Amino acid sequence: MPKLPELSVVVPCYNEQDVIRECHRRLTEAIRPHVSSFEIVYVNDGSSDNTLSLLLGLYSSNAEVRIVNFSRNFGHQLAVSAGLEYAEGEAVAIIDADLQDPPEVLVQMLQKYREGYDVVYGVRRTRLGESLFKLQTAKFFYRFINLLSDTPIPLDTGDFRLMSRRAVAALTSMRESHRLLRGMASWIGFRQFGLEYERAPRFAGTTKYPFRKMLSLAIDGVLSFSTLPLRLFTFAGIAAAVFALLGIFYALALRLFTNIWVRGWTLLFIGMLFLGGLQLISLGIVGEYVGRIYTETKRRPLFLVQEFFGAKNAGKPGSESMLTVKQWRE
Ligand code: UDP
Ligand code: MG
């Protein structure tokens, strides 16, 4: 049995042909002097560009490269989850391929890990080269989610982090299909440390997180960590019922003791529209949760791996790539 690496670095890649080589160079340069052994687990999340062939090129000339090749695009959070599943290191780090999170910060994270922390997560002090819109929505997102969620999620963190083997085991044991890893990593507890760093602009290429994906990540975050939205509508329902009761007395009083009882049409009209809207929204929110229950009960594998290129067997070139469909759930 070959010795397990001291550190694994998980790198999700989706159409990152412009950054892969530089990413690998900077990563290896940054960590090689600080660990006795390491592996880099690239997860190719169904890229349609040259990402896979570039990764295979790296694999053929570097002993520390592993490739998890998805059968299609499953999304960033699932790509990272797969990387965690395949990583064998004593400690496991997660980093984006685009070098927005500087690999050199991993060394500081490693130091904190060695001091005994299980989860060392990056806290973005500044973010360069991102649109004002993205900055503002991200800021709002983290504050909103914390308002609603039962699990506090540290402000301004992403998935850039380094975790101990037991923290990774805890994460991979959580089998839900809507995954906001930064929230799950907070939920597991253990000893956690937030390390501040400066976020750099993307090295090359464009963001793979359009507004649509950000919104769905935000909704996942709120719904998977809280049932408070459901409760809010219970409260709204109670408030509406109290108003209705007052309205009943008011209408009866007008009808019985005065002769102006045809008035009040405006109130009626507004009340009808308002309650109709409220009911549709609450139905929609209930629907979101029901949809999630539906997805979970299907118990589909979270992702499908088409090929895994693992550690090379010394002296047996060519036998290293195996064709597997590894499933998350047994
Ligand atoms: N990514 C992925 N699958 C996706 C979208 C993104 O694996 O469906 C990867 C991407 O290659 C990058 C990381 O997730 O390494 C973060 O994406 P990106 O930098 O585009 O997001 P941003 O930093 O703009 O939020
Ligand atoms: Mg990025």
Image (cartoon, rainbow, N blue to C red):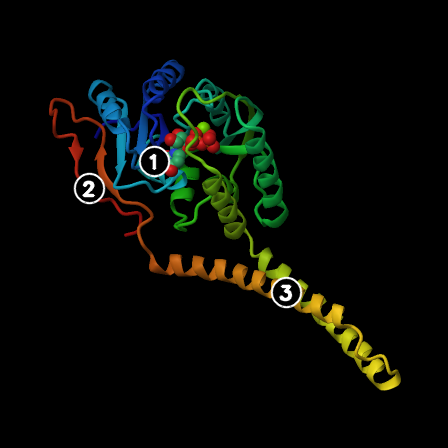
Q: Quadrant of residue 107?
A: top left
| Residue mark closest to the camera, 3 vs 2 | 3
Residue at 53% across / 35% down in the picture?
191
Mark closer to the chain start, 2 or 1: 1
Where is mark 1, residue-wise? 83
Residue 19 in sight: yes
Residue 188 in sight: no
Where is mark 2, residue-wise? 324
Using the numbered discs, state the Cα–Cα distance from disc 3 to disc 2 in whole angstroms: 48 Å
Using the numbered discs, state the Cα–Cα distance from disc 1 to disc 3 in whole angstroms: 40 Å
Secondary element under disc 2, as helix, strand or loop, is: loop
Is 27 situated left or right of 112 in this image? left
Q: Which mark is residue 234?
A: 3
Mark 2 Cβ inside 8 Å of ligand 1 = no
Mark closer to the chain start, 1 or 3: 1
Secondary element under disc 1, as helix, strand or loop, is: helix
